[in-house]
Amino acid sequence: MDEPSPPPKQVAAHDAHVAPNARLGLVLFVVYLALYLGFMGIATFKYELFGSTPFGGVNLAILYGMGLIVAALVLAVIYMTLCKPEK
Amino acid sequence: MAIAIFSFFVGAVLFLSFYLGSKARSAKGYYAAHGQVGWFVNGIAFAGDYLSAASFLGICGMIAFYGYDGFLYSIGYLAGWIVALFVIAEPIKRLGKFTFADALDAQFHSRGIKLTAAVSTLIVSIFYLIPQMVGAGALVTPLLGIPHAWGVIIVGVAVIVIVVTAGMVSTTWVQFIKGSLLVFFCTILVGMILARGLHTSPPGDVKVVSKSADGKTTLVNGQPASETNALAVGHVLALPDGKTETGPLGPIAYLHTVQNATIETYKKSVKDNVTTYTPAPQKGADLLTPGGYFKDIKAGTWRGKLNFLSLMLALFCGTAALPHILIRYYTVKDAASARKSTVVGIAAIGFFYVLTLYLGLGAMTSGSLDPSDSNMSAPLLAKSFNPILFAIISAIAFTTVLGTVSGLIMAASGAVAHDIMGSLMNIAMDDHAKVKAGKIASVVVGVIAIVLGMVFKAFNVTFLVGWAFNIAASANLPALVMLLFWRGTTRQGITASITVGLLSSLAWILLSADAYTNLYGLPATSAPAPFNQPGIITIPLAFVVLIVVSLMTRNSGRRRQTSGFEVAAAAR
């Protein structure tokens, strides 16, 4: 993924916050992408791991899947909280 | 009673559409709800848009039939929202245009881009419309006892009425109401599943279910299907520790118990055009790991693994590229509201997808499944509790279809009226004429959807949704991402990328084993595409084409002078 465009010279004042927000979005995106790739990686290379039951008597496939859903929400809330407010 | 409840729901939705639609007058009002829809309402409407018949009926059915693999779709569909929120949401809103094609064109003022983007919007919308219409037909048949075709016609006509009389204001509110109802009643249903717990039954009486080639004749154990040998399968054969029933279970204990149980599922096989379903006991531990549907993951072949990875990639990249999801970003007033909307949307959708796992497993063990139609699993599960609940859930699923289809027709008719007629064919239109053109386009697209809904009757709903996601991700996503994040993007690059992404994914799908067996009735082995899901090849291909063509044309003097952010600033 490319870095976001640097703020152009003639950028309007109310646009100055855009780049930091976009960068924050990309950082969180990369975090989630890593989690998602981890899931795909287990399915592809270490399939038998999915059957193990690390805790609660529920297997890793279910735990990881639920984890991805919860992680999406957590990251979205973090994003909303950290984004610079708009004038 | 069922018909009364059903009619009440549909009538109420239509009434609201008329009422709210009387407030929408200008073109901006028609297309983008005056930019004044509140962020919470819009967020739930996102959920309403997204939780289509495919999510509700398709995923529940797939889990009920194949176990964990249906949940893979839940995970992938939700993950797509991360791309939408973190990468696309803010910049696209700031471009301040009505459609995907407009947003792209804001940079370049190019007819080529308008045409390719509008065509891709139209094709993706239609591919997404077909499964919704098929789902509508499958819903009304058991509920109202009328033929499949009538269900398709009812949905088509109702949606055309909604869209033509009201526009986006109504569709946002319809989606909001529908999204709320769906999550609410499914939560109740899951509560009932957990309260009922699990109990064992002896192996069912149904040994063989077969369907003739035309799908019209169904035989159960060699006898015609009837009330007395009704198709009601799906039982727990054995529970852990030799128990016969568990009583009420908590959410974790429920999964733990299923994992250690033995469950009777049904295996499908096709021979001489006759489809047969036979009982196949399975271990819970196998049902709760991937590989029931995507069998090749377990087998460990590279082709199977690539197919699986390709699907997960297409689901991941597809959401942000769906035209009817993008259009909703324009209905809130600023970027902060769009952000809040998406968070609300993710919360509602994520919660619903957690519910789908329980709905699917509940249906799998409810003793009420029809082994020949996975799409009916969720409504039949409700029926196993209570006929009134069955009517309510069916009505919600039906309004789900209504809402999704109206959103799609809005997007498709917007593409036609705005981009193809307004800009490309240089037809000068005032506000009034634009709305009129949009309405005429809606009727045409609606009629096309009705016809296709009948033609594709025999198709699996999720099969077609997978196509739509692959095409959207291949055609639209690379153009959108590069437009927003790479200053070197040229208009020729965008046009080439959309064209190549659209054509390559479409061609791959039409040459895949799935299409060969289900569409043409040819043997799967003769299909030229190495695996079914094109995304893992066609999405990177569209990126590469965009970059190469942009680099080749960057000195042609037509390179854009500004980034997406600047144009957004200038547009404000």
Image (spheres, coloured by chain):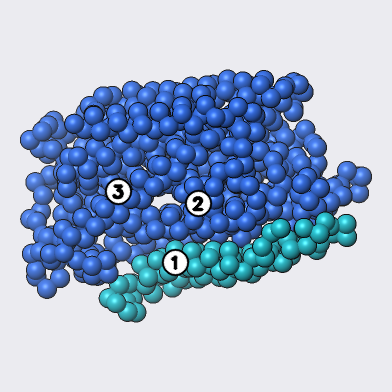
Which residue lies at the image location 71% right of the left edge and 38% below the top edge? B102
Q: Quadrant of residue B256?
A: bottom left
* Distance from Cα at disc 3 to Cα at disc 1: 21 Å
Q: Position of residue A47 (x, y in %)?
A: 41, 70
Residue bearing the label numbered 3: B185
Residue drawn at the location 40% of the way across and 66% of the way down: A66
Residue B411 versus residue B325 in the image, above or below: above
The answer to whether B246 appears left or right of B21 in the picture is left
Q: Disc 1 and disc 2: Cα gap in Å? A: 20 Å
Q: Secondary structure at mark 3?
A: helix
**Crowd rating for badge 2 (residues with CA inside 10 Å; few <14, some 14–19, many 20+):** some
Amino acid under disc 2: Phe
> The disc numbered 3 marks a residue on which chain?
B
Q: Quadrant of the N terminus of chain B?
A: top left
Q: Which residue is mark 2?
A: B40
Tell me, for residue A70, which label it has, or none.
1
Q: Identify the residue at image location x=40%, y=42%.
A: B178
Do the residues indicated by labels 1 and 2 lie within the same chain of the protein?
A: no
The chain displayed cyan equals A
Amino acid identity at mark 1: Val
Q: Position of residue B406 (x, y in %)?
A: 48, 33
Q: Are marks 3 and 2 in contact (CB under 8 Å)?
A: no
Task: Work out whether residue A66 can be spotted.
Answer: yes
Say which quarter of the image contains residue B300.
Answer: bottom left
Q: Secondary structure at mark 2?
A: helix
Furthest residue in direction bottom, as rendered: A54
Relative to A47, say whether B203 is above or below: above
Graded by Cα atoms within 10 Å as few (under 14), some (14 to 19) or many (20 or more), the crowding at tag 3 reads some
Q: Colour of chain B?
A: blue
